[in-house]
Amino acid sequence: MQTPVSAEEKRKFLRWFLDHYQLKKRESVWILNYLLNHQSILKHVHFVRDVKYCPRGILMTTHCSGDTPFRFYKDHLVTTDAEKSFHDIRLNPEEPLYLQLNFKKSHQNAYYVSVMEENPFKPDSQDITEKDRLTAVRLLEDSLFAFQKNRLLSEIDRALDDMDRKRFDKLVRKLHQLEESYVDQPGLQKQ
């Protein structure tokens, strides 16, 4: 279980952040300053990654990052209008607000990491394991093999129907090559 981050820790971090980084949208600075000056709202702010999954969140980006300058997420709506997010913060001061700050090497910044919290809305499926990747590759290879084999078998049937011995022999050789190359791949089974 993660220890909650105090409003004072968040305030110190935001002060440091505003002193060290320049945001792409000036409205982002206004919003952060508003949060700094309203401790009661700041206690409902949570710094997370992947804010797009949160019911109410803001993404802000500095000039040193190539990411989108600003996004406000509210339920299933997304806007780049910072004034709408500011209005929403003022109208709903006790509603949780999730904040993602994009800046150079943010994942390596100890100060930012110290105020980060686990995103409770991020789907587990976002974390793809090596096993999942290998399973997907195998499924793709199996599907491709089955498609190519069925296509060749259909063409072989047509060659038999047409009594075209030369074409039949050529297609049978292709089928054998396909089956041999499929068996040679590590982790794959011949169907």
Image (cartoon, rainbow, N blue to C red):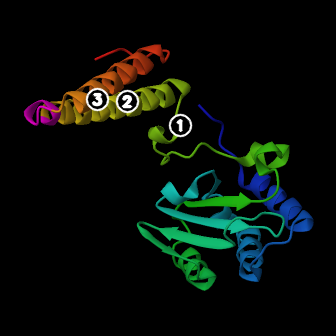
Residue located at (78% from left, 51% from top) = 106
- Does 103 sit left or right of 91 as displayed? right
- Does 68 sit left or right of 15 as displayed? left
| Mark 2 lies on residue | 139
Main secondary-structure element of the magenta-colored stretch: helix
Viewer-nearest of labels 1 and 3? Answer: 3
Return the mark for residue 165. Answer: none
Return the mark for residue 171. Answer: 3
- From the viewer's side, name the closer residue of 65 and 152: 152
Classify the position of the N terminus by image quarter.
top right
Query: Which mark sits nearer the N-terminus, 2 or 1?
Result: 1
Query: Which mark sits nearer the N-terminus, 2 or 3?
Result: 2
Dot 1 amino acid type: Asp
x, y percentage for residue 75?
42, 66
Residue located at (45% from left, 39% from top) = 125
Q: Secondary structure at mark 2?
A: helix
Classify the position of the C terminus by image quarter.
top left
Crowding at dot 1, Cα within 10 Å, few <14 / some 14-19 / many 20+, comes out as few
Q: Secondary structure at mark 1?
A: loop
Viewer-nearest of labels 2 and 1? Answer: 2
x, y percentage for residue 23?
79, 72
x, y percentage for residue 35?
71, 70
- From the viewer's side, name the closer residue of 13 and 64: 64
Marks 2/1: CA distance?
A: 19 Å
Q: Quadrant of residue 161?
A: top left
Q: Which residues are magenta?
A: 158-163
| Mark 1 lies on residue | 127
**Above/below status of 93 relative to 102:** below
Is 180 included in the stretch rendered in magenta?
no
